[in-house]
Image (spheres, grey):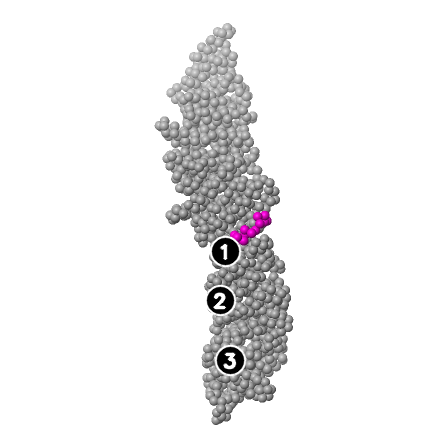
Amino acid sequence: PCWNPTSSGSPDCGGKDSLLIVLLNVRMLLRLDPAPAECEADTVEIFGFVWVTETALVEKTQLLFGLFRQNVYKLETLVKSSSHDFGLAGNLHYEADDLRQQCVLFLQYVKVFLHRLVFPSSSMDAGPSQPYEELELQFPSALLEELFGLTLLTGRLKDLPANVQSALVIQNPGKIFPPSWHLLHLHLDIHWSVLEILHILGHKMQGQVVYAHQFVNLTGENLTDTSLFEDHLCSLLCDLTGLAMGKYSKVRPTEVLSSNHYLCTCTKEIWILIMHLLEYRNKTLHTQSFWSYMNSLLKPLALGQPGADGFSGLPSHCKDPLGFTWWLVTHLTMLGQYSRNGTIQSEVRKHLDDNWTFVEGLLKLTCNPKVSISFVLLEQVRMHVHCCLTLCLLWGSSTAAVSILWDYYSKNLNASFTVPWLGVSALGTQLKTPLAVLEEARRLGCPSPVRSPGHTQLYRSASSFHLFLRVLALCLGQDGVGGVPQRQIKGRIYSKFSSKKMLELSEAGLMNFLLLFLVVARQVELEDVASRFCELLGFLPSNRPPAHRSLVWRGQLALLLLFQRGLDVGVQASWLASSFNETAKEFYNKTTEASRRQALWGPLGSYLDGVAEVFEMSSSLSLSEEKLLSEGFDWLLPACRQSELNSALSFLQVVLAQLSLMNSDSNRLSQLSVVKERHLAVATALWTHFFPFLRSLRLSQTPPAQLADTAAGFTLLAFDLPSSAPQDLQPNPLQSIMQCFGWDDMVNPLLVTRYLPHLLQNSELVSSLSGAAAGSAQSLSVKAWFRCVLQQHLHRNLHGTDSRTGEKLFNASRAVGEQLSELTRLVLRLPEVDDLLQKAALHPASSRLEPTTALEMFVKAVGSVYSGLSLLSERSAMITRALSYIGDILKYINPYVVSKNHEGIQLAYWAVGCVVKHWSPLLATSRCQQLLFRIVDGLLLPHNLPQDKALRDSLPLYLQGLSVASGVSQSQGVYLKQQLRSVTCRYLDHFLPVSPSIGSIANHPVLLAACEPSPTVRGAALRRSILGFKGHTPPPRLASVLIFLFELLRRNTDSDVTLLTVPLPSLLRCLMLVNEPQVRKTSLDALQLVVERCAVASSEGPCEQMIAVLRSFVEENEGVYARQVYGVLETVAVLDPSVVQALIPSLSQSLRSCEHKQGLGKNITLR
């Protein structure tokens, strides 16, 4: 058989037939027929001739080997004469392949012949009886001489011409190969076959030494089958190593494990075959093992000494002898995983024994450059340790190897072990949190499989120290290591640290120290390692740099995370908390410089992050974690700036949330009382060291954004564990703390808006607020929501915009809006509010209403429910509830008026107007009248009007509400009507346009208030107070007033004659006195509308009320404006003749009286 890639088409040099080599090797090692299906006939054709199968090799030994040599010569000649003519390439390939196949067939025949037909001679003294028997006796010696001749013929692989050796690196071979390729692989066939034949020969001779008699006679030197095997094996190993050395010169350190030591699959399989053959001979014949041969070859190379006897011919120059030795041993070990059938075995089951003794010597050369032939660079150390880690995974760890490495790293613990040319990737990840440190330690303790990318690429991502920690973790955690080796390694690690050593540690050294102890702690007794760890850290000075302190705390907290296995962290937590307290006091100290305080925040922030992770990772919070919440927070929190305080509050939220979760789990699982005691201890620490500071911030006008979230966490804590709350919050801590942060009118509305949703979405908490004794709690929550809606623009400046700009403004406004919408949704779901809405038959159109829409709906619901009550006690109770809902509403909106916040003023006027309109019967009661008077005086009749737009938009609401209140009030009805007239007169004139037009009058707020789409009693009452002129002098802007009056009459369908005739005297006087065309036209239109409606209303005859008005008009004006009076009556007669006809007797008598007074006789004109 031969290495032939063409049968499989594989891009590698080996193919289907190369796998057969491995299978044939298995048959050889099992002492089976090498080729049971071949040479079965009586004759066999070799080199073009037919031979007798059973005798040819004995009888024609020299001839057959001579023909073999001729074929080799022919193939060599073909290589020399070959050209680059592609037209001849195919012919040359087939001719070279045929020559090679003949040679391979002959070698296979030799192996089969040896296995089947050669036996040791039974008696060396008995003479041969036949010539063939004599040849049989001489055959082993003759075969040995011919094999020796073959080795001389082929020579060494290293001595092949360059054009032949280059065939090893042919990439992506096709179907056709050059003759040099066939010659090279024939040499490989011969080299392996010589070893195989000598092995079979030795086996068949059953221990008898075979001598080459003719060679001995000619040269005087001994040549045996054993010596030839040894010489040829050493030469072959030396040549294969030389080929690997040539490839190593092109291997980068980052490619050490991904670049193999063989040039093609053929050489790889020769290595595998040699390994199996030598290991088999070692176990059966007690000869040297494969590693024994390789150690003899590689040790002088690593030491820079001359090669051992038998191993000559290695290249004189090697880029890095020590690195090459590591590389080759590692890859040979990986090849040792191949079983006899060609499959890779697991890393636990290995065919090739370990070679730790030799590798430990290599480690000493790596770790002690004085012994090595050259200085070992950091990049080389990393490569060597990477190889060592690979060997640990393949062989199992070595305590001696770990000790050698630790001796090296203990002396260089402060080094960063970075490789400069690798760049940033070589620095590794920055371990900013204890969990990250612990995860790194876990990764170091859980190495990836040997052939995985995670392992082969470690050179780029891990320093040599991290690789060592992986080796250490394997040694401490492997199954075969008992208690004694573990204690030895741990003792050696401990022994390297002293107070002096700890003081010498740099920042990098501290990080390495932390990772070292975490890796050890994960594998051995945690409490013992933790105790020693804290003891060593105690040697560090108190004035160490803040960066060092951050690292130390990070490492200690990472160690505490390991205690989550169920061990109490009290001792370690107390030690850490003590250090934290000292740092927090220095941070608080007023004499501490700003730069120093900023530097101190580094370790303090790390402590917060780490403690948060400890709480998050805890499975029960029952391991004394509360000791981490020490008095240092009493000093830290008051000294924090805004960004630092945000970090502290975020940390506090994590702790509160985790405590709540653990407490609910313990209640659900009914855990032991000791767990609940620990939860109470954590809660007590939170109340003691955090809550007082939070309470001091509640009245801040610029509270931190997360204060509300944190306060909500404490509120839920008071709900879950009320007994843990301090005495000043007892006996009802839940409502006490809600009063502090949610119900107090002094608290910033932004804080309340963000605080209450956390609580109202908790169904259990809302249920507790729904009890009979807790009804006021819901009312207080509604009042807080009402205030938040009213004051939602309070954080904006004069022009209604936020002081922030750009994206921050948009995000902040959107967040406030979302929070207020969520609060609105939750308030509407409160049982008390939902009951009001149900009674008022008001159902939200969607689950998420706009806050202002929801406020209007709620106000309507309260007013509707009140109007539907009949019992005095129910009405009184409803008034109490309503007043509690709106609180001191004028106080809530006063900041808008003071700051002249346009958007806020508009919202305030609208909201109060809704209350006045929909609660008018309620406000008219004696208990609420003072509030109504304050609203009128403060908003409608102030000395200075704050904003025309707000008044214009909301004035109709006020006028409609006041008209109803003035009608239902029993004690102050007259005063309210007076106030209503004052408001009406003030704003009727205020909003009248200078130039009269229907378009400008159409949206007059007083007009809109009096003209509702659906007729109401309050509309009629309001119109009654609006109509009519005072005095005899026409008002200014008479045309605008008349247009307003005409629109007021036109938009309403009033049929009450008494109401309709109210403006009639004024209209008659305008027609009598004013000649301006627009005034006369508008007056005439209005008069016509009044007369026609009065006529319709008085269907049985002339309208008496109108006749009375006309009679009074004539009596008052006849003496002065007699002619104008009759002109006006003439106009009325056209509109309604019956009314004027009814006046004729009165007019006649009046005229005679007038003539009599004047004493001028009859007035013909007037008559």
Could you say whether the residue bearing mark 2 is in a helix, strand or loop?
loop
Could you say whether the residue bearing mark 3 is in a helix, strand or loop?
helix
Q: Is residue 40 visible?
A: yes
The relative height of residue 286 versus residue 414 in the rendered view (above or below) is below
At x 45% / y 45%, what residue is drawn? 682
Q: From the image, state whether disc 1 or disc 2 is nearer to you.
A: 1
Residue that badge 3 annotates: 199
Q: From the image, state whether disc 1 or disc 3 is nearer to you.
A: 1
The relative height of residue 358 versus residue 1090 in the rendered view (above or below) is below
Specify the farthest residue to the left. Answer: 871
At x 37% / y 48%, what residue is drawn? 670
**Label 1, label 3: how many angstroms apart (C-alpha)?**
56 Å
- Residue 556 percent coordinates (x, y): 52, 51
Q: Which residues are magenta?
A: 529-546
The reply to whether discs 2 and 3 touch (Cβ–Cβ < 8 Å) is no
The reply to whether discs 1 and 2 touch (Cβ–Cβ < 8 Å) is no
Local crowd size for mark 2, using a 10 Å CA cut-off: few (<14), some (14–19), many (≥20) = some
Give whichever of discs 1 and 2 has the lower sequence position.
2
Three-letter amino acid code at the position of disc 1: Val
Three-letter amino acid code at the position of disc 2: Glu
The relative height of residue 629 versus residue 218 in the rendered view (above or below) is above
The relative height of residue 1011 versus residue 247 in the rendered view (above or below) is above
At x 41% / y 29%, what residue is drawn? 880
**Label 1, label 2: how many angstroms apart (C-alpha)?**
30 Å
Give whichever of discs 1 and 3 has the lower sequence position.
3
- Toward the viewer: 1058 or 916? 916
Local crowd size for mark 1, using a 10 Å CA cut-off: few (<14), some (14–19), many (≥20) = many
Residue that badge 2 annotates: 347
- Residue 254 percent coordinates (x, y): 58, 63
Residue that badge 1 annotates: 529
Give whichever of discs 2 and 3 has the lower sequence position.
3
